[in-house]
Image (cartoon, rainbow, N blue to C red):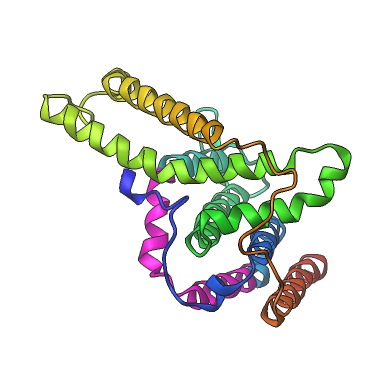
Amino acid sequence: MLRDITLGQYYQADSLIHRLDPRVKLMAAMVYIISLFTFRGIAGFVLVTAFLIFMVKLCRVPFFFMVKGLKAIVVLMVLTAIFNLFLTPGKHVLLHFLVFTVTLEGVYNAGFMLIRLSYLIVGTSILTLTTTPNQLTDGLEKSLKPFSKIGVPVHAIAMMMSIALRFIPILIEETDIIMKAQMARGADFESGNIIKRAKNMIPLLVPLFISAFRRADDLAMAMEARCYEGGEGRTKMKPLKYSPGDYTAYLVLAVYMAAVIILRIVL
């Protein structure tokens, strides 16, 4: 399960998406997320699905590698579907028992919510799979730079995002190592009810937190030893520059978002 978390991982490949400016990919991720919760009806669903398939084909990342990230949120997806199924009011009642009522509208909402969550994980994973943490940090800092005029610590925010993304794979690997070590000593993380499983996680969480705090302290000491003072006056080894392909990507995003909005208004 831990190995199935794809957030924060980078997949090396030579594709059009990999070569795009990180600012374009950040904007694309934002537009895509907005479109997921904007579209309605079959026509909007077909448009979003076609756009996702197009992006997956362009990024040249194996589809199974992105899909396996869904395993980490199966419980969240099931709970979301249950709440939408039983708590959505509607005129067309399909089933009624005790205090729960299943309506056609509830089935519709539950199905589309599952689709939205699945598309959300697969689509946003393209951003981290095709962008290195350094590129993502530079793109985020450059995109938020206008907010520095009103006192927003843009560089600090970008640095925190970069460190968080770098720590995700490290902590996943650390958790896997600790779990295997505890299982070799007789720990059981799979059997029993929910309460028992939660208690069995204590031998895993304590050393994990200690390791995380130790790594954070080592990183802080390393930054202080190198006289790190933030983004004031710092230069970039590889400054970001737009290419003709980046402007084409912006145009495609604008057309896609306009199509989603038009379909929502018309249908």
- 52, 266: nearer the viewer: 52
Q: Quadrant of residue 160?
A: top right
Quadrant placement of the C terminus: bottom right
Question: What's drawn in magenta, residue-wise?
Answer: 45-74
Work out which quarter of the rendered image holds the N terminus and state it: top left
Q: Residue at x 75, y 68 (%)?
A: 257
Q: Position of residue 196 (x, y in %)?
A: 27, 19
Q: Give left or right: position of 182 versus 96.
A: left
Is residue 52 in view?
Answer: yes
Residue 141 part of the magenta segment: no
Q: Is residue 222 above or below residue 166?
A: above
Task: Report the magenta stretch's main SS.
Answer: helix
Residue at the spot x=77%, y=65% of the render? Answer: 264
Residue 135 placement (x, y as % from top left): 58, 59
Instruction: Determine whether 254 is above or below 167 in the image.
Output: below
Q: Is residue 133 above or below residue 149?
A: below
Q: Nearer the viewer, residue 194 or 230?
A: 230
Residue sitting at x 70%, y 61%: 27
Please identify the quarter of the rendering in which residue 211 is found. top left
Q: Nearer the viewer, residue 48 or 84?
A: 48
Q: Seen from this angle, which residue lies furthest right?
A: 150
